[in-house]
Image (cartoon, rainbow, N blue to C red):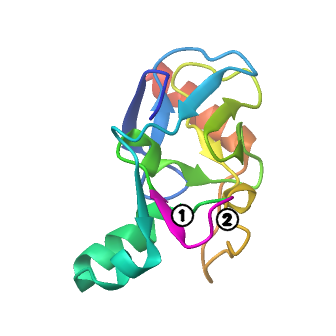
Amino acid sequence: MMLVPTYVAPSRIEGVGIFSEVPIPAGSVIWRFDPMFDRLITEGQVEDLSEALRTFVDRYGYPHMTQPGLIVLVGDNGRFMNHSPQPNTVFTDPDFGYAKVDIEAGCELVCDYAEFDPAFQMLPGRQFVLADSLSRAAEAAAGA
């Protein structure tokens, strides 16, 4: 569950992304696994789902870092966090996510998917905007 106020908006990286409503100091806890909002699903449960639901879990879920066979499905805006090779967050702990740097209000929150999913591979044809481009996009949006 996101612990900072966020909103979902169009992303220059891909589709939509999650953006901070407020400034976030570096080192702040921004996400915590909360079983009230986030789910742990077994791989067997996923196999039993309809194709549409399996596609949803595949897109928004990720393997649990320390519990093989479990998939984490985030239930709030956190599921819209995009990948960046230059993330402004850290997700190396299965229960918490942190701000890696000071994050301005209006800035897209991005993470490195490989931190929590060792099997992560960039899909062919996808390109991601660098962090400095994200900052310029946030500045342009704030001025609009």
Q: Nearer the viewer, residue 32 or 106?
A: 32
> Looking at the picture, how far across and down is residue 70, in whole percent?
52, 66
Q: Residue at x 46, y 63 (%)?
A: 61
110 relative position to 77: left or right: right
> Looking at the picture, how far across and down is residue 32, in whole percent?
54, 33
Q: Quick check: 37 above or below 26?
A: below
Q: Nearer the viewer, residue 102 or 14?
A: 102
Quadrant location of the N terminus in the rendered image: top left
Q: Residue at x 33, y 69 (%)?
A: 56
23 relative position to 49: left or right: right
Residue 35 sits in quarter? top left
Give the mark nearest the N terminus, 2 or 1.
1
Q: Secondary structure at mark 1?
A: strand
Q: Amino acid at mark 2?
A: Asp
Q: State the extent of the magenta-drawn residues as a range.
A: 66-72
Disc 2 to disc 1, how far (Cα)? 7 Å
Quadrant location of the C terminus in the rendered image: top left
Q: Residues within 10 Å of mark 2 (few under 14, many from 20)?
A: some
23 relative position to 86: left or right: left
Q: Residue at x 57, y 36 (%)?
A: 137
> Looking at the picture, how far across and down is residue 119, in whole percent?
70, 75
Q: Which mark is residue 62?
A: 1
**Residue corresponding to mark 2:** 117
Q: Quick check: 121 above or below 97?
A: below
> Looking at the picture, how far across and down is residue 8, in whole percent?
37, 39
Q: Secondary structure at mark 2?
A: loop
Q: Residues within 10 Å of mark 1 (few under 14, many from 20)?
A: many
Q: Amino acid at mark 1?
A: Tyr
Q: Quick check: 50 above or below 2?
A: below
Q: Residue at x 68, y 53 (%)?
A: 84
Q: Are marks 2 and 1 in contact (CB under 8 Å)?
A: yes
